[in-house]
Amino acid sequence: MLRFASSPTGDMHIGNLREALLNHLVAQQNKEDLIIRIEDTDKEKNIDGKDKEILDILGLFGIDYSQVIYQSESVRFHSAMALQLMHEKKAFSCFCSDDWLDKKKEESKVAKTPYLYDDACRNLPAELVIDNTSPFCIRITRPDTVIKINDKIQGDMSYEPYAMDSFIILNQLKIATYDFVCAVDDMLNNISIVIRDEDHMSSTPKQEHIRESLSYDKKVEYAHLATISGDDFSVKHLLEEGFLPQAISNYLISIGNKTPKEIFTVEEAKEWFTLETLSKDPTPFDIETLRSINEEHLKSLDPKELSRYVGFADIEIGELARIYLDEARTTKELKAKIAPIFSERVIPEALTKSVATMKAIIIAAPYFDKYDDFKNHVMKESGLEGENFLISLRLLLTNAQNGPEIAEIYKYLKNYIGEIVK
């Protein structure tokens, strides 16, 4: 079982989507289920509707999952596991005040040593615990053996017991901490491999220690993805800017990776993707590379599908749009090229007369299949020639003074000529 965990506290960003994509790929390759875990225990930060938005984006990108789990629905299990650790003397009540802990942290800072809790409350006599009315949290006892992690990207890692302290698993409000919740949920859901950003690496030994303390003997594998540096674009923003889901997926699978080809689909990636080829080093997000990949995916669309991105469902308009792919690399840019063709003309004052003459001739003209026949007819009837003729004709056909060859444009607009010039 694999899982993609996301918090409904903001927009999904490219790093989150990459995690989801790679979990999807590995789950498909291993023929395992992928679950979506909505980490919604921080009620104050949750934004209404963000969980649905997350699921909608995953659906748009073709990410299959077997079920959706809301972390808040497992609170009773988190509390039960903490009580089990208390009962087995693997966790203890800590009455240390925030002021006292802050003082210890400051002392560590002055001494230039990492702060580690000194287990001041670990061995308190029972009577001092039972009758104590002070606020308290629950801490898990520090490990007494080396914690070893198998990471498919970063390599094998080990953490010495002295490098960890007895960290908090339930705060003073008896709410489980992030590391405890994640460790328990991964255990309950029988997760086999955790694929996530390297920002979570510091949590890994803690979560391993929690599961070991709970006598969970299944070894979880890890793959910590190197951070995507630079602009942290939201997925929604990229979609609004006209990047195709398949192009975004292509780019995110390529980042810091050795791929057999530059342009591919997620289905194709299932045949060769492996976590072991991913770089350990951060990779910058390059919007220009994404634009180039997006252009190639636009070119691969069939004409009717391409036309839908510019507001039509017509093969000829799709072919027309394809002509403009030398000038536009996103659907937003492409729509900005096509929309003016079907909009009211903006004619420079100097060309008003010639355009009006040409417009009347075109409206009255018979249908011409070939551009040369059409052009010769309009030229003969209008008496216009040279630059004046070409610019006027281009304005009438495209609402722009420059662009692709008019002969190519005419090929796909000839059935719309009457509608366009009006």
Image (cartoon, helix red, strand yellow):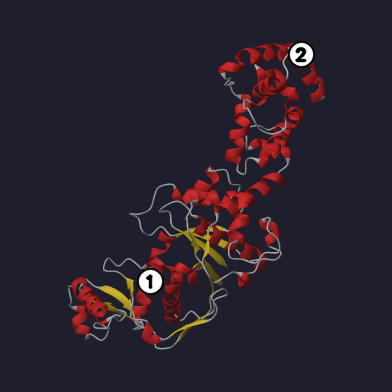
Q: Is residue 357 above or below residue 287?
A: above
In the displayed structure, would residue 72 be above or below residue 339?
A: below
Q: Position of residue 224 (x, y in %)?
A: 52, 70
The residue at which mark 2 appears reads as 365
Identify the secondary structure beneath mark 2: loop
Query: Mark 2 and mark 1: span between their CA atoms?
Result: 83 Å
Q: Are marks 2 and 1 in contact (CB under 8 Å)?
A: no
Give the camera-side residue of 92 and 282: 282
Graded by Cα atoms within 10 Å as few (under 14), some (14 to 19) or many (20 or more), the crowding at tag 1 reads few
Q: Residue at x 65, y 32 (%)?
A: 312
- Which residue shows up at 73% across the image and 41% down it? 302
Could you tell me which residue is drawn at 41 percent across and 76 percent down? 206
Identity of the residue furthest to the bottom in this view: 145
Q: Position of residue 127 (x, y in %)?
A: 19, 83
Specify whether residue 64 is in view: no
Query: Which residue type carries mark 2?
Result: Ala
Q: Quadrant of the N terminus?
A: bottom right
Comparing labels 2 and 1, the label whose residue is closer to the camera: 2
